Image: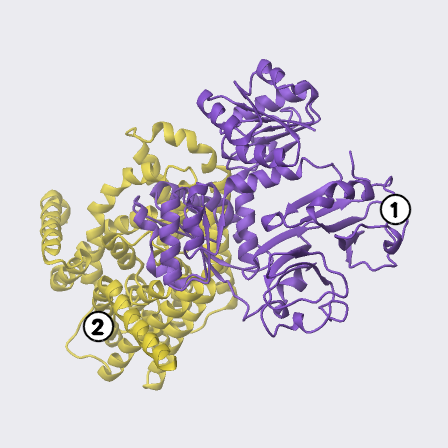
Amino acid sequence: MEYLENLFLFGGIILMAFFLIGHLSQRLRVPSLLMYMVLGVALGWMVTETAQTALGQVADLGIVLLFFLLGLQFPLNRLVSISRKIWKVGFADIALSFGVTAILAYLFGFDSLSALIVGGVAYASSSSITVRMLEETGRTSTPEGEFKLALLIFEDIAAPVMVSVLLGLSIEGTVTLSTLGLLFLKVVLMTGLTLVIAFYGFRRLDLFVKRYSTRDFMPLLTAAIAFIWAGFAVYLGLSKLLGAFLAGVMLAETGASRELGRTMVHAKDLTLPFFFFTFGSSLTFGATILAPALLIVLILWGVVAKVIVGLWGGRSYGLSHEGSLRAAFSLVQRGEFSVVIAAMAETALRVFSGVYILVTATFGVVMFRNAPRIADAISRVLARRRHARSANGG
Amino acid sequence: MQIVIVGGGETGAELALRLAAKSQSVVLIEKDPQRATELQEQTGVLVINGDGANAQTLEKAKIRSAGLLIAVTDINEVNIIACMVGKNKQVPRTVARIRTLEDPANTESRGLSLEQMGIDVVINPERAVAHEILKMILFPDAEEVEYFAGNRVVMVRVPVSTGSELTSQTLRALRLEKGSIVMGIKRANGDFVIPGGNDRVQAGDRVYVIGNVDVIRGAQWLLPKEATQIRRVLILGGGVIGRYLASLVESSREQPFRTKIIEKDPEASEALNRALSKTIVLPGDASDRSYFNAEEFADADAVVAVTGDDRTNIVASVMAEKMGAKKIIARVNDMGYAPVYSASAVDSAVNPHLITASQILRLTRSEDLVSLSLLKNEDAEAMELVLPPSAKVVGKKLADAGLPKGVLIGMIVRDGETTIPHGDTVLKAGDHLIVFALPKLSSRLDRVFGTAS
């Protein structure tokens, strides 16, 4: 109750803290989201359950807007062609990140459900961290940025399926084929509906949107569509991020992405720090960690698996050698889906997962930042070696 | 034939020169007085200074007696009006150059049909250039490529190296792959031969081989070295040509490519992203430096530089060559740069004006001609023509048809089937003949095949 009574005071203090942290991160040249996360981890003990819920709701706004704005950058036909190219990489990602991790955990003595949950935690790269990092480093519109987004979208479709499967397993101990089928049906329905509305609705609204894009009521329309579609996805039991993204795709068909994006960008900037903060504060830590040896092995494998997916997948997607190297080193960070899946586990495993997520997220962000430099260095070494070999051969 | 050309730009001038060389009676209409005087001196044809969309100017150019009106000004609307007026004055054939992004023959977007606009043939230089470049990508080892019979038959020119299978025997004894035939030999000393069965190909020659597309594409025996494999295509410049080309390459059914396009203008990149589905678009930072992308050059098999700026194209080509691109194609707008291109790394330079001119030149021949292409240095003409029922060779065996020496029927397309004819093959009305001939014989061809109008 006291939070609500002193809403402005609390809210203002939090915003001021975010501002200071954001500014500091700029001075220290550290990605701001990492600082928000660390702040969340540090202050996690202070956040009560009610506060966590309230903060979580603001955080949800932020993440939905982030994905909505992302969707605005993807015209429909682009999305269709991307999905045609990404599915192979997507399945390889499931096999390596989820499959191999689960097998490793099983071999280390975890029971099969725990092993599957650990696999789920290790599966998805964090969409929010990746998208935010792409924004921060200005790499969103590069081909490798597109590849990463494509993979994230695939994961965002696959992860809810995974969540519901694991949920079914952990609660009832079984997953029926019909539940799975229903879930797929919903994904198809949602996407199909988006296509239809985009083609027959928004494509014809281009003049309307252009005419009123600067009026004060336009942000209402934009936000309404983003929230309705995200909410509809949640209603269907799918990811809200997927819904928000698809809402952006629909509105992109009006051809006024830039103008519409401008109406929402401040709202996103205000709310997104909450997401990373609550992400940090929701991680569970404890004094003892289950199977530390396995944890180290899994973290290492978590890095290697994503590097493989990025390298091979990037090449098969059509990226240059260096582009796929950059992609390979930008996928390590795990995030929100891992948290959701970790929440299903019992306490000891939750601590295990919390450490896993925090380490990969931190390490992933650092690697993401330095990916261009790493890629450059590797390709220079390779070029030199090739040169030496051809000189020897000749 | 009296030919009226509206517009004395590079294409108009080139056309005037080439047509005059073929002793056609050409009148050129040019709006700019100074340019008109220059053209008069340069081309030697009659140049009228005036507005080509004006009926009086066209009357002055004797439009009523013209057999062909070619409108190639830089302004689409002028070209369209010139054709409308021309058609109104009973010109049998009108050609307009129309530069648009959409297909000019697609009348829906225009609201008027070509017929209503009085246009018989639309030439879209950007489209033509893109098609030309696509051929070079599909046949990277060929020095020249021409399609016939609705793209089912292709003719390529390739150099012959020492030890090539082609040099081993006389053409008659040579066992070429089924469905292909040597149609012409360009000797090392520059002579051009339409070969007979007893001729031999020698190392250093360049041969013109024609055949079904599949046969020629897989023809390792044709090549002096390992066939160049092109999988990754990098296009520089997302202007009209770049965009056409990207969509052509995307939809190429003959071979799947991975295409990337670099466009310096971020907004144009966004439009490209909307228009293209499989191509990866790399948006630049609005400066020309965006095109000099070493990383992407190193990754590309073929680099196609089609920005609007010749110098950018040249620099990018040199860079691409250094980075190991296997095939480099560049657009050259100003022919003044041609020597720079031939001295540099560019494998093939394409000039929109020349391509437009050669497309239009085909139209100066009779209507039974489906296509006509002039080979490099105008050594010979390769053409596809439909045999009219009135032709005197109809019903005769090829051996008895009395073809002059220097003319070769390489292929016959009958009911959709392609065959290589021999002496006993009987010619039928409606046959599509793919004929190779020395240029001096072209007037006699009209008599033989009844294509004289």
Q: How many marks?
A: 2
Query: Is residue A267 or residue B24 the one in the foreground?
Result: B24
Q: Residue at x 13, y 49 (%)?
A: A3
Residue located beneath label 2 in the image: A355
Residue type (three-letter) at the residue carrying disc 1: Val
Q: Given the image, what chain letter belongs to the residue carrying mark 2?
A: A
Residue located beneath label 1 in the image: B394
Q: Given the image, what chain letter belongs to the residue carrying mark 1?
A: B
| Farthest-out residue, top | B56
Instruction: In the picture, one chain is purple; tell me its letter.
Output: B
Q: Residue at x 71, y 26 (%)?
A: B92
Picture coordinates of residue A85 (x, y %)? 47, 60
Q: In the rendered image of this protein, does residue B429 appear above or below residue A304? A: above
Residue type (three-letter) at the residue carrying disc 2: Val
The reply, left or right, for residue B395 in relation to residue A312 is right
The CA distance from mark 1 to mark 2 is 87 Å
Query: Is residue A85 or residue B317 the one in the foreground?
Result: B317
Residue B47 in sight from this viewpoint: yes
| Farthest-out residue, right | B395
Q: Are marks 1 and 2 in contact (CB under 8 Å)?
A: no
Picture coordinates of residue B107 (x, y %)? 60, 31
Instruction: In the picture, one chain is yellow; tell me its letter.
Output: A
